[in-house]
Amino acid sequence: MKKMISVSILAANFLELGKDIEMLNKSEADWIHIDVMDGVFVPNFSFGMQITKRISGISKKPLDVHLMINDPHKYLKSFKDAGASLITVHFEARNDTQENIREIKSFGLKAGVVISPETSVIAFEKFIPDVDVFMLMSVHPGFGGQRFIERTYDKIKELKCLISSKSSNALIEVDGGVDLSNAKKLADAGADILVAGNSIFSSPDPVEYISELKEAIG
Ligand code: DX5
Ligand code: ZN
């Protein structure tokens, strides 16, 4: 399967969000990554289902919704209705991950589980039969523009072994601090989807930067 880029709009210009989505529509981006924060699970706020729904109305790319919230089960249906294609919940969130996965799948959506940098990969093991995407945070959740955590490469390799040992087709997504300096190495280590925000939006030509990322990961 071709490796993919999911663009985090946390780094977009919120006053011109529509223009940025149109720009991504014309780019080689595979997904649009939407970071939802509740000010409790992470010390920051971002956006919720209303903005997600408006984005879904104009986006030609599927929406990859990353819930950094403590009680995802309360909002899964709302994000489904808002147009999510993939919903990813944190293993560290307060409620039952297995139950969240079951509900996301019952909507006919792709289900993802994500771990923060301090959580070990083995936490994913029991979810392998049911999950489409396992995501590794390569920065601390809550903010864009942080420095990439180097230990992520080892976690990708460990996760790849774990997934293969269970004959699963689950994809590996890596979120945070991704740019042209590490994208190829991440793909070579086994990542299937790379999330990038600041590196894309701070470049002079985001469409070109996305093309270069895609070329780097092959
Ligand atoms: C961090 C978010 C990431 C972030 C990635 O809490 O989950 O998705 O927006 O942005 P960059 O690429 O700027 O690290
Ligand atoms: Zn994210």
Image: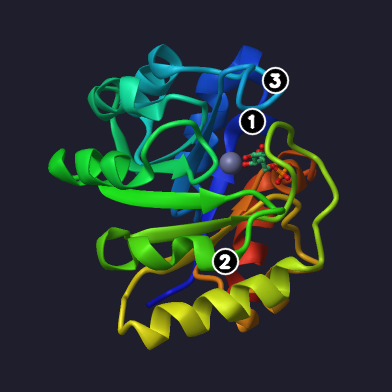
Return the residue at label 1: 10
Q: Can residue 187 be seen in this view?
A: no
What residue does disc 3 label?
44
Q: Which amino acid does label 3 sit on?
A: Asn
Q: Quadrant of residue 157?
A: bottom right
Given residues 7 and 117, the one toward you in this image is 117
Q: In the visual, does 217 lie left or right of 98?
A: right
Q: Quadrant of the N terminus?
A: bottom left
Residue count near mark 1 (Cα–Cα under 10 Å), binned few <14, some 14–19, many ≥20: many
State if disc 2 and disc 1 touch (CB < 8 Å).
Answer: no
Left or right side of 117 for 164: left
Q: What element carries label 2?
A: helix
Say above or below: 181 vs 82: below
Pointer 2 local density, CA inside 10 Å: few below 14, some 14–19, many at least 20? many
The yes-or-no answer for disc 1 within 8 Å of ligand 1 is yes
Q: Where is residue 51 in the image (x, y as percent from the top left)?
A: 45, 16
The mark lying in front, picked from 1 and 2, is: 2
Work out how far the residue at label 3 is from the one at label 1, CA to CA, in angstroms. Answer: 12 Å
**N-term-proximal mark, 3 vs 1:** 1
x and y percentages locating residue 5 in the rendered image: 53, 57
Chosen colour scheme? rainbow
Residue situated in front as seen by the camera: 100 or 204? 100
Q: Residue at x 39, y 87 (%)?
A: 165
The Cα–Cα distance between marks 1 and 2, rounded to whole angstroms, is 26 Å
Ligand 1 neighbours mark 3 (CB distance < 8 Å)? yes
Q: Residue 121 carries which label?
A: 2
Mark 3 in CB contact with mark 2 (< 8 angstroms)? no
Q: How far apart are marks 3 and 2 (CA)?
A: 25 Å
What residue is at 42 percent from the left and 74 percent from the top? 2
Nearer-N-terminus badge (1/2): 1
**Which residue is depicted at the point 62% across and 62% down?**
120
Quarter of the view holding residue 38: top right
